[in-house]
């Protein structure tokens, strides 16, 4: 793409560089255009409350999408993140409501479960060499089944009736609810958490040795192996990280809604995938990257927020999400060629 | 085929070549790599057009503009990689019928039973007694080859080109193939037989044509030419041995590997090298060099025992082999050696990251310094570490692949066809890097089928044939002809063997 076209005429060159400019900054322009459009047509759009709302709403998607970004970096794919979000939501709710645990256990259990899911995925993909899409599709179903079986299909909430006649002993404690509902310096805590994770993951992937090796493993696995990189170890790490961030997203979700809803995480899979793929094209990176993923989920968030304001029903919003995903996939594919 | 000429750009590949096959004979076409064999056969098979010359089949002049026309005229081609000509997931009978199905104009409508019967008859013709419903995927390589042959016969081919048919066959399978060729000869089929295995050529061929640099240097009956003479014809003028500087190397064994299993050929290999020695592994394409090289760094599934500087190891992954001091510069450099979208710097510093980082944090300044140093000392062009490697030429890419090992703990360097696809200038650069490495006391294993280059750069040469190392010979006592002869299956009887004598006695000089 950056190769100079020797024989190209000036006009062709101009077309080429316009295309390149669009490719590099197209996503940012799209975000700005969407913001401008909603800003003009919707009075309520340009308010602090609304922007804080948008950021709050994308914080969970971004966490999940960063996990997906890790699996994409090692040239893998993780479809099980949505189920893992659900599982973590139920696990933290159960710990609080059914077992009266304090904050520490409530956070630890879902995170460990997320890591376990990642280990299971990497066992199937790295050890048994199953295709990543199929293996994680299978775990996606299995994990969804696990959280449904555990709850027998019912949500977990404060003072819920128990089968033995009494009510649940515990409740959502304030320190847990702070994660999804609290504010620090006027900024929602979940947004701060998201920004912290984005920055940390970005620095890790861009400036550290393991971050570099993640990318090299994904770019050319055979060359990486012949360069002495323990590729299987890095692929395992990637799926574990993916599971971990999905679980973190699940915790924030549980805290945000204050109940443990079954299958509440399902929608985060496709939103996260879309965000990560949109991220390919941000600044013309051409590869999965955390900053791009953040912009991807901002684009999705702004769009959905604006559409909701315009009273577009949520089921019609899926059409737009799908269209964006197609566009993002096409763009990342085009870059690869 | 008369007076065939072909040039690619300014390079003349064929210079007025006359070639003919009679019904019921096997005509072998021989020559070194680049002699023009494949071009000639591609013209005959209709894949490329000649610049000049005519093709006549059974008295009728033909001009093929596509492989289909050549096929209709009765030319059949059994390619070397038979897998590319078959559909692995389909049963044999459907594979055999595939060409006819593709022919829209007149594809015969047959019942399934008839089709299977028809296929069984075809298989019988090539001596295969396997059910036609067997999936191609489950067939052995030998069977697949015969299936392709049967497919070619089904299109009424009267002249069949066999391109390296025995390259991957065992001795017994080769015998069986030859028996089938004999039988088809009786039925009036003419064969053009291309092979590097000269002994087999002598066994099967009725006539020989030897090409060298696009010209015919010999054409005549096969029986009247000895193996030694064939090699001389193929290699041409006996070159004055280039005055090679005698290199000295250490006497202690720095690297040894015993019982290294090569999965593909089910053979085991013992190999050793002294400190500072450049050891060549010479073999034809398909002799198992790449398999051996990749097994030695445990990139392929293997077993065996390694020894580096007196310490014993067993490796089960390249990670372990590399940690112990081995490294492989692989044959497929773009696929196996490089991170194409990444910069030269990132590619060069893969192995140096631990030194360049503190608490896992890579120091950009140190990294650029390290990369700059390597770029300068290797003469990589353009001399900027930030260029993406995919924009570099083949030679410069190869320098990057080598460069990543230079400042590491690697003590034993395995080069697999390191001069493949790079220009003459870059070749010399690669050679001088290799010599420098050896002079620094590193041990070099050099896997190649470029025999002149092996003689130029190596101190010692192993002869590799069909997954086995047959001999370990000092390079200074080897001639190019000998090397070709040994690797083509000629017997090795010591440095003062038969071949050497004939060369000196006959003293043939070809112009």
Image (cartoon, coloured by chain):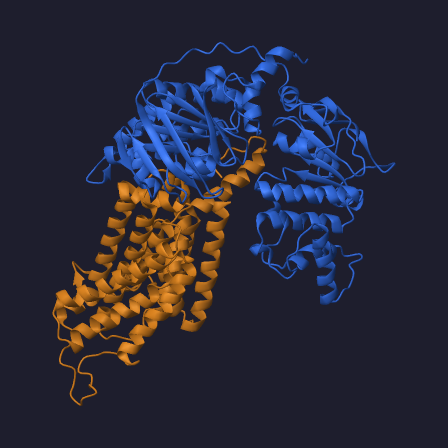
Chain colours: A orange, B blue
Which of A220 and B285 lies nearest the eye of the viewer? B285
Side of A100 where B354 appears, left or right:
right
- The quadrant in which residue B381 appears is top left
- The quadrant in which residue A187 appears is bottom left
Query: Which x, y percent locates residue A70?
Result: 33, 52
Side of B88 where B404 appears, left or right:
left
Which of B223 and A119 lies nearest the eye of the viewer? B223
Please tell me whether residue A18 is drawn above or below residue A308 in the rendered image. above
Which of B147 and A185 lies nearest the eye of the viewer? B147
Q: In the image as oriented, which residue stretches furthest toward the bottom?
A: A165
The residue at 48%/17% (across/down) is B456
- The quadrant in which residue B388 appears is top left
Please tell me whether residue A164 is drawn above or below residue B360 in the rendered image. below
User: Is residue B258 in view from this perspective?
Assistant: yes
* Count of all numbered marks drawn on residues in the image: 0
Q: In the image as oriented, which residue stretches furthest toward the right?
A: B59
The residue at 67%/33% (across/down) is B203
Query: Which x, y percent locates residue A207?
Result: 27, 41
Query: Which x, y percent locates residue B357?
Result: 23, 36
The residue at 47%/43% (across/down) is B266
Query: Which x, y percent locates residue A197?
Result: 24, 54
Side of B52 where B324 appears, left or right:
left
């Amino acid at each position: 793409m950056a190769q100079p076209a020797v024989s190209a005429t000036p006009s062709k060159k101009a077309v080429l560089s316009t295309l390149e400019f669009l490719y590099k900054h197209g996503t940012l322009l799209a975000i700005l255009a969407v913001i401008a459009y909603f800003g003009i047509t919707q009075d309520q759009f340009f308010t602090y409350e609304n922007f804080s709302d948008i950021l709050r709403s994308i914080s969970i998607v971004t966490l999940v999408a960063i996990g997906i970004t890790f699996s994409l970096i090692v040239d893998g794919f993780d479809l099980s993140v949505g189920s893992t979000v659900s599982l973590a939501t139920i696990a933290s709710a159960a710990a609080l409501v059914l077992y009266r645990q304090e904050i520490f256990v409530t956070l630890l259990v879902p995170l460990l479960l997320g890591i376990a899911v990642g280990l299971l995925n990497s066992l199937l993909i790295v050890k048994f060499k199953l295709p990543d899409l199929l293996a994680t599709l299978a775990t996606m179903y299995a994990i969804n089944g696990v959280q449904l079986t555990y709850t027998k299909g019912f949500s977990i909430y404060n003072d819920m009736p128990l089968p033995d006649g009494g009510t649940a002993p515990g409740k959502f404690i304030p320190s847990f609810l702070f994660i999804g509902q609290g504010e620090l310096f006027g900024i929602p805590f979940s947004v701060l958490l998201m920004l912290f994770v984005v920055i940390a993951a970005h620095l890790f992937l861009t400036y550290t040795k393991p971050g570099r090796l993640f990318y090299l493993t994904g770019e050319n696995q055979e060359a990486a192996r012949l360069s002495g990189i323990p590729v299987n170890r890095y692929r395992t790490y990637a799926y574990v990280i993916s599971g971990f961030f999905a679980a973190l997203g699940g915790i924030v979700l549980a805290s945000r809604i204050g109940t443990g809803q079954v299958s509440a995480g399902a929608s985060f899979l496709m939103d996260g995938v879309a965000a990560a793929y949109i991220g390919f094209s941000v600044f013309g990176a051409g590869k999965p990257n955390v900053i791009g993923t953040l912009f991807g989920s901002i684009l999705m968030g702004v769009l959905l927020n604006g559409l909701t304001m315009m009273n577009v029903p949520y089921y019609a919003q899926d059409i737009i999400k799908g269209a964006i995903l197609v566009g993002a996939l096409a763009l990342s594919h085009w870059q690869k060629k | 085929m008369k007076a065939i000429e072909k040039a690619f750009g300014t390079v003349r590949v064929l210079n007025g070549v006359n070639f003919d096959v009679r019904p019921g004979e096997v005509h072998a076409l021989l020559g070194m790599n680049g002699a023009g064999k494949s071009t000639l056969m591609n013209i005959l098979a209709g894949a490329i057009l000649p610049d000049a010359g005519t093709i006549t089949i059974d008295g009728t002049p033909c001009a093929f503009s596509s492989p289909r026309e050549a096929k209709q005229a009765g030319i059949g081609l059994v390619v070397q990689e038979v897998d590319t000509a078959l559909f692995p997931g389909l049963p044999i009978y459907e594979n055999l019928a595939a060409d006819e199905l593709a022919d829209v104009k007149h594809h015969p409508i047959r019942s399934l039973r008839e089709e299977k019967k028809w296929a069984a008859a075809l298989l019988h013709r090539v001596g295969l007694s396997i059910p036609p419903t067997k999936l191609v995927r489950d067939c052995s390589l030998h069977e697949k080859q015969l299936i392709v042959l049967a497919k070619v016969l089904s299109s009424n081919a009267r002249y069949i080109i066999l391109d390296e048919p025995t390259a991957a066959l065992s001795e017994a399978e080769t015998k069986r193939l030859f028996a089938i060729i004999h039988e088809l000869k009786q039925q009036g089929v003419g064969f053009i037989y291309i092979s590097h295995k000269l002994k087999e050529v002598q066994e099967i061929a009725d006539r020989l044509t030897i090409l060298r640099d696009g010209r015919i240097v010999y054409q005549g009956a096969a029986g009247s030419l000895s193996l030694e003479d064939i090699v001389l014809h193929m290699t041409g003028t006996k070159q004055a041995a280039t005055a090679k500087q005698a290199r000295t190397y250490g006497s202690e064994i720095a690297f040894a590997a015993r019982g290294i299993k090569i999965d593909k050929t089910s053979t085991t290999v013992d190999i050793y090298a002294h400190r500072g020695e450049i050891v060549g592994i010479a073999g034809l394409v398909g002799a198992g060099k790449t398999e051996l090289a990749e097994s030695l760094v445990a990139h392929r599934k293997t077993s065996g025992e390694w020894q580096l500087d007196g310490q014993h190891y067993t490796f089960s992954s390249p990670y372990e082999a590399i940690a112990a001091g081995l490294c492989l510069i692989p044959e497929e450099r773009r696929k196996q050696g490089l991170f194409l979208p990444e910069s030269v710097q990132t590619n060069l510093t893969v192995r140096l990251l631990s030194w360049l980082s503190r608490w896992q944090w890579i120091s950009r300044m140190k990294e650029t310094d390290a990369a700059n140093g390597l770029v300068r000392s290797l003469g990589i062009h353009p001399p900027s570490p930030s260029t993406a490697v995919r924009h570099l030429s083949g030679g410069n890419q190869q320098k990057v692949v080598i460069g990543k090992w230079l400042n590491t703990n690697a003590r034993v360097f395995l080069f697999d066809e390191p001069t493949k696809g790079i220009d003459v200038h870059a070749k010399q650069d690669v050679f001088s890097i290799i010599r420098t490495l050896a002079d620094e006391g590193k041990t070099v294993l050099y896997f190649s089928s470029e025999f002149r280059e092996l003689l130029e750069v190596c101190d010692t040469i192993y002869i590799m044939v069909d997954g086995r190392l047959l001999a370990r010979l000092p390079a200074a006592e080897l001639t190019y002809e000998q090397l070709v002869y040994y690797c083509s299956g000629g017997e090795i009887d010591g440095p003062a063997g038969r071949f050497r004598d004939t060369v000196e006695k006959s003293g043939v000089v070809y112009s």
